[in-house]
Amino acid sequence: MISGILNIYKEKGYTSHDVVAKLRGIVGQKKIGHTGTLDPDAEGVLPVCLGRATKVCGLLTDKDKTYEAVLLLGRTTDTQDVTGQILSERPLISDGREITPETAKACVMSFEGEYDQVPPMYSALKVNGKKLYELAREGKTVERKSRKVSIRRIRITEIDLPRIRMEVECSKGTYIRTLCHDIGEKLGCGGCMESLLRTRVGGFALADSRKLGEVEEWVRSGRLHEILIPADRVFDRMREVRTSEPYDRFVHNGSPVELHGLDAGTAGGDGPAFEENEMVRLYDSRGIFVGVYRYDPAGKRFRPEKMFYDPDQPDK
């Protein structure tokens, strides 16, 4: 079984599920999962997990993301982007005055920080077991609770009204379509999203992403391993520890390991002590990633949180 993460460049026209389905055919295995829905007309970074790495799908979904978006002012649609049915078209007037680049910029920047965002009807969120976009396609609208999202940073790269091009860094669960809609509503002229490019998910960047056709070429040449990112990369901010050889078999079976079972070079020594509930990346004595462990000071041991060990994994 192939295990690892592929940094996929999702092209326009594909759903996230389409990407997974195509990859299953390309690599010849079923155990593949994506790390969060990206709209069909959006492009950009979509980390896809294979094999044992599917255990990190949820963790990657929780990562902050960065987007490049174009906001079109003066138009609202049922999908909050330009693909939807037009609901209104209004002149660029705010409080009886023509909207200028300066007033538009001030409004956009006012969304930096936390705000309560109501998820759009055309989204994959579920209400009573049914996805919102399925209800929307049936012509139904249901009440949605607002959710607090965090807009870490907005950088406006161009204002050429009625369009505003901007880069947005945001928390998980943020809908850029809805952000565009909300900016338009606050200005009083309405707005929708014209285009969207996701440039970063956690540590996965656009510059390192691969299109499906490229992945297929790597598979054909027998070199997929060269672009496959190991699962432990997701945990690179955690401290790394290794077991001493006699304790390899214990951690391979998912057992806890005591401090004295660690290699002396990673067991703390004269360095900083481990904090209560500190999470670490644990490797065996050969340097093979075993899993994420949590430190229990009462027993002076590490307990497994997520296991990734593959007995068929070759030695490093």
Image: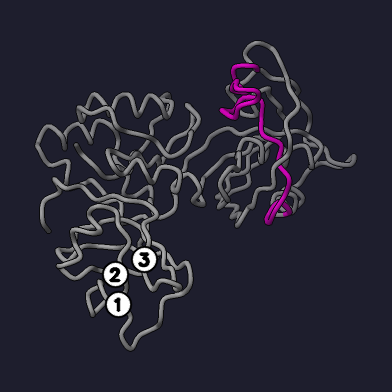
Q: Is residue 148 left or right of residue 154?
A: right
Mark 3–mark 1 Cα distance, whole angstroms, equals 11 Å
- Residue kind at label 1, given as amino acid type: Ala
The image shows residue 33, relative to residue 198, as above or below, that is above
The image shows residue 259, relative to residue 254, as above or below, that is below
- 124 magenta-colored: yes
Residue 120 image position (x, y, % from top left): 66, 30
Which segment did they paint magenta? 110-135
- 117 magenta-colored: yes
| Depth order, front residue of 275/73 | 275
| Depth order, front residue of 286/175 | 286
Helix, strand or loop at mark 2: strand
Q: Mark 2 points at which residue?
A: 241
Residue 75 found in image quarter: top right
Specify which label sits upstream in the sequence, 3 or 2. Answer: 2
Q: In which quarter of the image is the N terminus?
A: top left
Helix, strand or loop at mark 3: strand
- Residue kind at label 2, given as amino acid type: Val
Instruction: Tell me whether circle 3 and circle 2 mark residues in contact (CB < 8 Å).
Output: yes
Which disc is residue 267 wearing?
Answer: 1
Q: Name the residue under label 3.
A: 302
The image shows residue 2, relative to residue 285, as above or below, that is above
Residue 113 image position (x, y, % from top left): 68, 56
Residue 237 found in image quarter: bottom left
